Amino acid sequence: MSSVIEKALGILELLTEDPDGYTVSEIAAQTGQPMSGVHRQLNEFARLGYVRQHEAGGRYSLSLKLAAMGLNYLTRCGINDFAQPVLDKLAQASHELIRLSVVDGDKLIWVAVAQGATTGLRYDPGPEQGMQIHLASTAGGLAWLSTMDDDAAIALVSKQGLRSGSTAAGLRVIESIAELQKLLATFREQGYAYSANTYTVGLAAMAMPVRNTLTGNVVGCVSIAGPYARLNEDRARELSPTLKQAAIELGAASSASSFFTHSAGLKQAG
């Protein structure tokens, strides 16, 4: 890290990863900054209301100020207003978990969810809203990558790596760029991405990109996720027309938000 702003943002980004916070020494070690500089920046953040210290000499964690700013921004963008009815309808039709992710620069972020499973096995992922998606291990990430040419997709995956960081036994990992390219070619042809046991053991998911109808840009992805015992490849094919309709509706509705009509998007596959 070089600039003062970059160093400050690095501290804030680290603090989003654990609500219990970190000590000054932990923050310094993980951000590669000197303890003296980290301490000064934390004191400034505390003065401005962005962080709090649990006790004298103790851990620092985020206050709710940043979260409130983010929620306020999402509300003013209108994402939940236009998306939630479509997600709820898809959840009722599929009886599975539905998630919407949005493109933010070179990242894909989960922003909204609807649960359609009411009995039996169900997947409840926990607090994933606001999290950056690992592209190579999730159906949503793979669906987004499939809209790009291979060079752009490989560049994004190279930043994150093929592995999500999880070491859980039983996870299926894409082992090479060649395998990734083959999968993306398949997903482009069939119109949706499908993955099983790549993000969570026993979980399967399918996803389609959402294109803004005014700009044609890919603004996000909508996915269906559930236990693999129920959401196998045959079931995914059955649900693909329903998922496609939801993606079309979300793309049309996104035109009401300036956040999506002004998004540039990355180079897409031709």
Image (cartoon, rainbow, N blue to C red):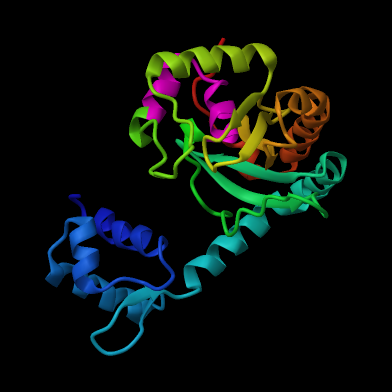
Q: Is residue 177 above or below residue 131?
A: above
- Figure label count: 0
Where is the C terminus found, in terms of image quarters?
top right
> Mainly helix, strand or loop, the magenta region?
helix
Q: Is residue 269 visible?
A: no
In the picture, measured across the screen, residue 53 lies left or right of residue 78, that is left
Q: Is residue 34 above or below residue 258?
A: below
In front of the other: 229 or 112 = 229
In the rendering, at what x and y percent does residue 216 appear? 66, 24
Give the residues in magenta. Answer: 138-157
- Residue 164: image quadrant is top left
Task: Spot the residue most to the bottom.
Answer: 56
In the picture, measured across the screen, residue 90 lies left or right of residue 64, that is right
In the rendering, at what x and y percent does residue 198 appear? 52, 35
In the rendering, at what x and y percent does residue 120 appear? 79, 51
- Residue 169: image quadrant is top left
In the picture, measured across the screen, residue 245 lies left or right of residue 263, that is right
Residue at 55% over, 42% down: 201
Whether residue 263 appears in magenta in the rendering, the answer is no
In the rendering, at what x and y percent does residue 260 appear? 63, 39
Residue at 76% over, 52% down: 115
